[in-house]
Amino acid sequence: MMGARQGTRSLLMRFLSYYAGQTHLFVADLLCALTIAGVDLAFPQILRSLTHGLFAGDASAIKPVLVYLLAGLAGMYALRFACRYFVIFWGHVMGARMESRMRQDLFDAYERMSLSYFDRNKTGDLMSRLVNDLFDISEVAHHGPEFVLIGIVEIVGSFVILGHISPQLTAVMGVMLAVVVAYNAYANWRMRAVYAESRMRIAGVNARLEDALAGVRVTKGFAAEDLERSKFAESNGAYLDSKTRMYRAMGRYQAAIAALMGALCTVIVVGGGWLVAEGRLQAADLATFALYISLFTSPIENILNFTETFQKALAGFARFAEVVGTVPDVRDAPGAPDLRVSKGSISYRDVCFSYPDEPDAPVIRDLTLDVAPGRTVALVGPSGGGKSTTCALLPRFYDVDGGAILIDGQDVRSVTQRSLREAIGLVQQDVYLFDGTIAENIAYGRPGATQVEIAAAGRRARVDEFALAMPDGYDTQVGERGTRLSGGQKQRIAIARVFLKNPAILILDEATSALDNESEQAVQESLAELAHGRTTMVIAHRLSTIRDADEIVTMEGGRVVERGTHADLLARGGTYARYYRMQFGHDG
Ligand code: ADP
């Protein structure tokens, strides 16, 4: 309980920190809110003076006053109008700015996370935090100061004025309001869990949707639409259930508040009538009383509704703060220098590794591997043997559990991630193209590259061959994730990126198995040119491509089982020789 309260407090502090930089707006917003409250409080008083005159039967005295009244009221309401405009417009803008900053902060946090974070979290859930969870927060951000301040001033002001008119009635009212406030606190406490659940459920719907859309080709291929529909219906139904629970709680709450406010009005009217009958209250004062009650019931309702929205926003903000507060698994050491690549030698020393979510299942065991500058090492072996993981450790996508990986004698953990990754070029099996043109996708390799440099990289990767045949050339849109291009074309764009980047070290995850012969030939030639003069680690799927590798390393179950040149390994007649025979049916 204590922990939860402290958690809420630090959440609040974090929330308030987003007002920073907008102090002038915030103060102006509050001043306008105060003015509105002042005008609202003054009106019943003015009316009271007027009705006192009326009830005193001195109607002739009223007429001359009306001119002043007209001028005064017109001025007051003009001021109220201006303030209202300010509060609505600038208040909302202030909230929207805060929301925008939070959204940017959340996105920045995602960009900062290590890969392990994305292994653990579903894309749809992460998107939901960015889109849905921040929604209520901006409402709270601007209604907060306005409703709370106007509300408090109007309620306290009304109480003071009413206390003057009739202390007895005001005391009764005070007791009843205390009951309302206590009930509100209790209801909010109960509703918080319901709101948090509903946030989680909508995130579930988004995650399901993301999964279904990303896998739509598989779904169509297996005619599995019904399965996807029923999986989606399940998440959707769970969300509906949680929303139903939320609205039930909301309904109970709002109805109870309405009943309590009704009881308050009844007590005041009946009690006030009794006081008038007793001669202890003037009829005009009872009318004023009723006016003040109607004046402050709306701020009370606003504040109560606000606390409810606040709970919703807090549930969203908690999910936001959780991400922003997550420390990435892979971090730069304090004051880490940049990697200085002289020749580009790679050295794995007794490396041990297991994925963070499965710490008891080692994926790499005591791996020692050296790649001399400019040389090529090929990793082969059964799938699941640890080849991709070995390569993922070099750019520090994950940190090793034991041992070390050195580039030109520098531990990859001791240098900045940026400089490390700038030195390494990756060509992966699954090419990801961003929405945009072919040229833009190549330029990803080196932001700021000129058109000439992009074209040169494209030529070397043999992108020219297909791009120039398209009507828009390099300005052809690739479609979402490159759907308008073939596998081989995407591969060549990925290779062009790395040509442009021009790193000293290369990691190639050969994807040629998915390509037709002609594409494979083109991709192979581009890859061979790319690897020329660079220190290269290749994950080989087709053994024909690695015959000339300086060393071939066979991995199984995260261990090196054999190493040597193609000729050595064939002569030894071990695992590699067996693989080779399986693929080619003969030696050599
Ligand atoms: P290979 O590239 O030789 O096929 P991998 O390095 O991809 O092998 O996989 C080695 C082992 O690590 C496999 O057992 C695989 O299930 C596991 N693995 C791979 N990626 C992850 C991941 N992101 N999280 C957890 N386990 C993983």
Image: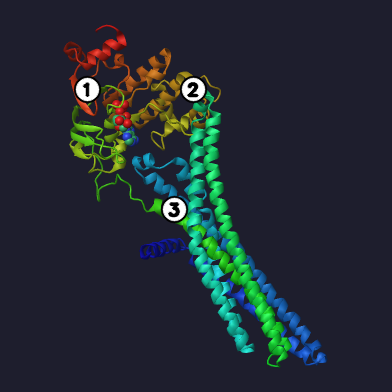
Q: Earlier in the sequence, mark 3 or mark 1?
A: 3
Residue labelled with disc 3: 320
Disc 2: CA contacts within 10 A as few (<14), some (14-19) or many (>=20): many
Per the rendering, the mark at residue 553 is: 1
Label 2 beta carbon less than 8 Å to ligand 1: no
Q: Earlier in the sequence, mark 1 or mark 2?
A: 2
Which amino acid lies under the numbered mark 3 shown in the image of this protein?
A: Phe
Tell me the distance, in whole angstroms, between the alpha carbons under discs 1 and 2: 37 Å
Q: Residue at x 43, y 41 (%)?
A: 122
Pinpoint residue 258: horizontal percent, then vertical percent.
Answer: 63, 68
In the displayed structure, would residue 180 be above or below residue 16?
A: below
Residue labelled with disc 2: 467
Q: Residue at x 33, y 50 (%)?
A: 327
Q: Is residue 481 visible?
A: yes
Tell which of 191 and 515 is nearer to you.
191
Which amino acid lies under the numbered mark 1 shown in the image of this protein?
A: Val
Disc 3: CA contacts within 10 A as few (<14), some (14-19) or many (>=20): many
Report the side of 513 relative to 39 (left or right). Answer: left
